[in-house]
Amino acid sequence: MSSTIHFHRSDTYTGMSAAAADFIVQAIRDKPNLLLCPATGNSPKGAYATLVDELRNQQIAHTLRLVALDEWVGLPVDSPHSGAFQVRQQLIEPLGIHHYFLFDGNFTDEAAELQRAGHYLAVQGPIDLCILGIGTNGHLGFNEPGDYLHALPHRVRLTETSRGHQMVAGAARAPDYGITLGMKDILQAKKILLLVHGEHKRAAMTAFLRQEITPRLPASFLWLHPDVTCFCDAVAVP
Ligand code: GLP
């Protein structure tokens, strides 16, 4: 895997999570008030848990800021299926982050919600470290594959693949729409960390590794970014 993206493959999910956590710790040591943009989902969960432990154990002081990557539309922030709930539980609360922006998936005024995200980034951005997962269909955040992509925060009709994500499996109804930062917001991040876990990611990763940049595979745009590191496990990239 020779490329401009730095790849680190671990045999296990635990190994991948530990390596990714070390990477994030180093980024926080380098910039204690880092603006973090964390994906939700299964791939980064282990890294977040290890990160929390490491920052505590090593008594690393920080004033982290955080901006949400995406959210399911229609889920209130206190729904355990929402991204906001998971980010609060996995990062904001255990790390004592006071300065953050989370989407409210249950918004009543879409334009205002998008503007809130744009405003937070305009004032606090660019993102220092954007932690991404890849969808089984190649999406980034909720930038879904299609004829074109969007630069800025936007609402998006979700593909059936995304609606089938485990996060919303127990929700009364899988959301039809998502809200997400756009490709420009993501690609303006100073550093990007891509975490990929699971056999079900193999096809997306095979396509990604072709280095063919296409809106049909939004993750392929990461090949345009100068500082991307990918931690994957051996079942995702055999
Ligand atoms: C979800 C989220 C993304 C996440 C991706 C991969 O749809 N909206 O932010 O990165 O899918 O999730 P997982 O790591 O659970 O496979």
Image (spheres, rainbow, N blue to C red):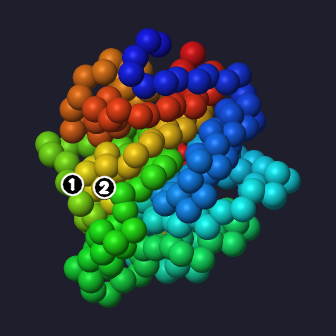
Left-right relation of 39 to 204: right
Q: Position of residue 224 (x, y in %)?
A: 28, 32
Provide the residue designation for mark 1. 151
- Pick the quarter of the image with the C terminus: top right
User: How many numbered marks does the figure carry?
Assistant: 2
- Work out which residue is located at the far top of the displayed protein and give it: 2
Q: Residues within 10 Å of mark 1 (few under 14, many from 20)?
A: some
- Determine the residue positioned at 23% across, 28% down: 213
CA gap between label 1 and label 2 equals: 7 Å
Is 58 above or below relative to 134?
A: below
| In-front residue for pair 193/111 | 193
| In-front residue for pair 63/224 | 63
Is the residue under label 2 in contact with that under label 1 (CB below 8 Å)?
yes
Disc 1, SS = loop
The amino acid beneath tag 1 is Ala
**Quadrant in the picture for residue 211:** top left
For residue 185, the mark is 2
Q: Position of residue 63 (x, y in %)?
A: 61, 67
The amino acid beneath tag 2 is Asp
Mark 1 sits near ligand 1, with its Cβ under 8 Å away: no
